[in-house]
Image: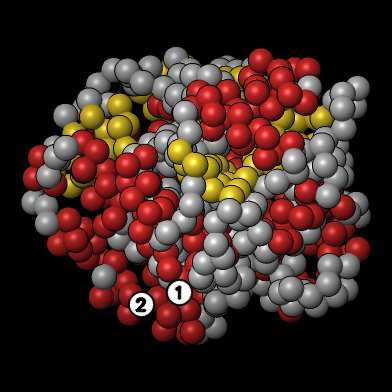
């Protein structure tokens, strides 16, 4: 049985194909269109999924969309009426799109797909919950979802047992931890729905001196993690801005202009909203595991990507095991919607749990060789052993290496298929990779990838394979300055042979050579662009940046031997601010 899950029309459009309850393909639309957070109909991702399944759209048994459009329209319309006439600009922006397209979503989806079969709709937060619980491998578990807003819900709690999933509590719009965090994202000069992780990365540079002010003036929360925003300071329900001027006055400085200097006040504001977020998430997690009596916890929704708060949950919320869906944001809704139909609509047993994220396109060495030959790029074709040895040689020479291998990752993290790698022992690599290769802010930390076997020797915390929980860098080991944040934390990836065999072998080989089985692992892209998907994307990024070498399949390319080429030869590229 084939089930196609789709998320689209807000941000991070994606598609996933289940075959008899098992995901065989999944991809974000942005990776194909090269438009970051692409929200349009995921036609490229759908076509890719169908090609992996070896089927046409007519052979799909059920197509399922990740939310219910009529409920979402009800929320939008109800809010507009309630806030009128102050939200006239929001009305002008939203209503034409809804009346022309989104309100007729069933017809629109059928037209886009060319499909007249079974079309189903899951709820937004139900899709999040299903993406976490049914992927977790836990037979029974508590469930917590948190994001900006779905149809009406901004957070839900519930439980799963076997193939049953029940959501028992919800927080409703406009009261939202995700929207609160996004308001601070905008206030600090970063792009809303894109730059929230920058706030998290900035927070350790400050002190949470505004946390009490935030609780007193902006948000009240309770022992169960539920909350209420003081809407006097927020504008997202009545206009196109996130907050009113009164919000800015609370902190004594105006909204930071993008790319302007970050002051200590900005850093303290970031630390304060992160502290508030930690407290609310821990309270919600503690309450749901206590109320359900199920100590294993599954999480999804964009807020669940806050790996700092996730560490607090592990340590403080009475949770035995934590699973966060690797694609916790809206893209993951495509997976959750499909799993929801398989298990709760069709009442099928669980036959799968998350076992890696390599669900995207892959490219053979013959195709890669042909692209290199057409571009007249000299490259060495190596055995697998030779590729590992040559890459380790480059890393120990303090080169930065692009690593393009196998199937592309599902989710927002590069986990060893589309990565940029460097030596974590070199203190210069943090700023070098940030400023000269990623073209991004110098304060941004990098994640360490460590072999699963060596994790406990180098880090204290949870061995997470998906970079979703921070931990502590052990002080009794060789310093790792380029992956250790200012507070001694690191967002680690514990790499197993089973999930990523070649990548694991590379890290282990680097460890054999240096005594440190750890590498800097950051996504293979530049600021403002999605992670690379194809060999041409990789070559374009390689020649647009100061990456020294490129392991492209079994081919190894170096700037020393390859001519300087115009990145535009490999397709359009835009290095833009995000």
Query: Count of labels shown?
Result: 2
Secondary element under disc 1, as helix, strand or loop, is helix
Provide the secondary structure element on which disc 2 rests: helix
Q: Residues within 10 Å of mark 1 (few under 14, many from 20)?
A: many
Residue 344: percent from left, percent from top: 29, 28
| Mark 1 or mark 2: whose residue is earlier in sequence | 1
Q: x, y percentage for residue 123?
A: 36, 45
Measured along the vertical axis of the image, is residue 540 above or below residue 95?
above
- Tag 1–tag 2 contact (CB < 8 Å): yes
Q: Residue at left 51%, top 80%?
A: 87
Task: State left or right for residue 140 relative to residue 269.
Answer: left
**Going 44% across and 26% down the picture, which residue do you hit?**
354
396 is higher (above) or lower (below) than 352:
below
Residue occupying the point 87% across, 58% down: 268
Which disc, if any, is residue 232?
Answer: none
Q: What is the crowding at mark 2: few (fewer than 14 residues within 10 Å), some, or many (at least 20)?
A: some
Is any atom of residue 12 visible in this view?
no
306 to the left or right of 206: left
Q: Is residue 96 depicted above or below 163 in this figure?
A: below
Report the residue at 71% width, 20% height from top. Answer: 512
Instruction: Give residue 80's mark.
Output: 1
Name the colour scheme.
secondary structure
Q: Is residue 346 left or right of residue 209?
A: left
Q: Quadrant of residue 312?
A: top right
Quadrant where the image shows the N terminus: top left
Could you tell me residue 89's position as x and y percent? Answer: 49, 84
Q: Nearer the viewer, residue 215 or 484?
A: 484
Q: Which mark is residue 95?
A: 2
Image quarter in which the C terminus is found: bottom right
Above or below, comparing residue 340 to residue 68 in the picture: above
In three-dimensional space, the C-alpha distance between marks 1 and 2, rounded to whole angstroms, equals 10 Å
């Amino acid at each position: 049985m084939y089930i196609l899950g789709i998320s689209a029309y807000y941000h991070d459009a994606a598609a996933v194909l289940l075959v008899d309850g098992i995901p065989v393909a999944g991809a974000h639309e942005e990776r194909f269109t090269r438009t970051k957070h692409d929200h349009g109909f995921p036609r490229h991702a759908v076509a890719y999924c169908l090609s992996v399944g070896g089927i046409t759209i007519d052979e799909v048994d059920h197509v399922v969309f990740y939310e219910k459009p009529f409920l979402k329209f009800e929320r939008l319309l109800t809010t507009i009426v309630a806030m009128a006439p102050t939200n006239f600009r929001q009305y002008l922006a939203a209503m034409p799109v809804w009346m022309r397209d989104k309100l007729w979503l069933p017809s629109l989806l059928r037209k886009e797909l060319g499909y007249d079969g079974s079309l189903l709709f899951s709820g937004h937060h139900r899709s999040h919950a299903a993406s976490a619980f049914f992927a977790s491998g836990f037979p029974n578990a508590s469930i917590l979802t948190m994001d900006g807003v779905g149809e009406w819900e901004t957070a839900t709690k519930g439980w799963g047992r076997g193939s049953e999933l029940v959501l028992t509590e919800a927080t409703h719009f406009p009261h939202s931890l995700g929207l609160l965090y996004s308001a601070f994202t905008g206030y600090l000069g970063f792009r809303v729905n894109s730059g929230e992780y920058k706030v998290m990365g900035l927070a350790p540079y400050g002190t949470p001196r505004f946390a009490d002010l935030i609780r007193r003036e902006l948000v009240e929360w309770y022992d169960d993690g539920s909350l209420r925003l003081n809407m006097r300071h927020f504008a997202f329900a009545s206009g196109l801005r996130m907050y009113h001027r009164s919000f800015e006055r609370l902190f004594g400085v105006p909204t930071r202009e993008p790319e302007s200097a970050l002051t200590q006040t900005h850093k303290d504001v970031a630390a304060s909203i992160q502290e508030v977020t930690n407290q609310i998430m821990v309270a919600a997690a503690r309450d749901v595991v206590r109320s359900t009596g199920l100590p294993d916890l599954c999480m999804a929704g964009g807020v669940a990507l806050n790996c700092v708060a996730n560490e607090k949950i592990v340590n403080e919320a009475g949770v035995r095991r934590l699973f966060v869906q690797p694609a916790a944001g809206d893209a993951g809704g495509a997976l959750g919607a499909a799993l929801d139909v398989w298990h709760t609509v069709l009442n099928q047993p669980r036959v799968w749990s998350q076992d890696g994220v390599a669900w995207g396109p892959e490219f053979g060495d013959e195709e890669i060789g042909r692209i290199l030959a057409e571009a007249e790029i000299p490259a060495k074709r190596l055995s697998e052993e030779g590729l590992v040895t040559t890459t380790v040689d480059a890393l120990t020479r303090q080169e930065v290496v692009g690593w393009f291998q196998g199937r592309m990752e599902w989710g927002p993290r590069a986990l060893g298929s589309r990565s940029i790698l460097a030596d974590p022992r070199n203190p210069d690599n943090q700023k070098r990779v940030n400023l000269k290769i990623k073209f991004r802010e110098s304060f941004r930390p990098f994640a360490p990838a460590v072999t699963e076997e060596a994790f406990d020797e180098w880090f204290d915390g949870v061995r997470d394979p998906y970079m979703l929980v921070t931990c502590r860098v052990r002080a009794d080991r060789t310093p790792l300055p380029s992956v250790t944040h200012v507070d001694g934390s690191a967002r680690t990836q514990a790499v197993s042979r089973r999930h990523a065999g070649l990548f694991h072998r590379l890290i282990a080989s680097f460890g054999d050579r240096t005594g440190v089985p750890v590498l800097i692992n950051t996504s293979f892209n530049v600021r403002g662009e999605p992670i690379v998907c194809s060999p041409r994307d990789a070559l374009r990024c390689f020649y647009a940046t100061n990456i020294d070498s490129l392991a492209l399949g079994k081919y190894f390319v170096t700037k020393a031997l390859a001519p300087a080429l115009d990145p535009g030869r490999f397709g359009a590229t835009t290095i833009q601010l995000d």
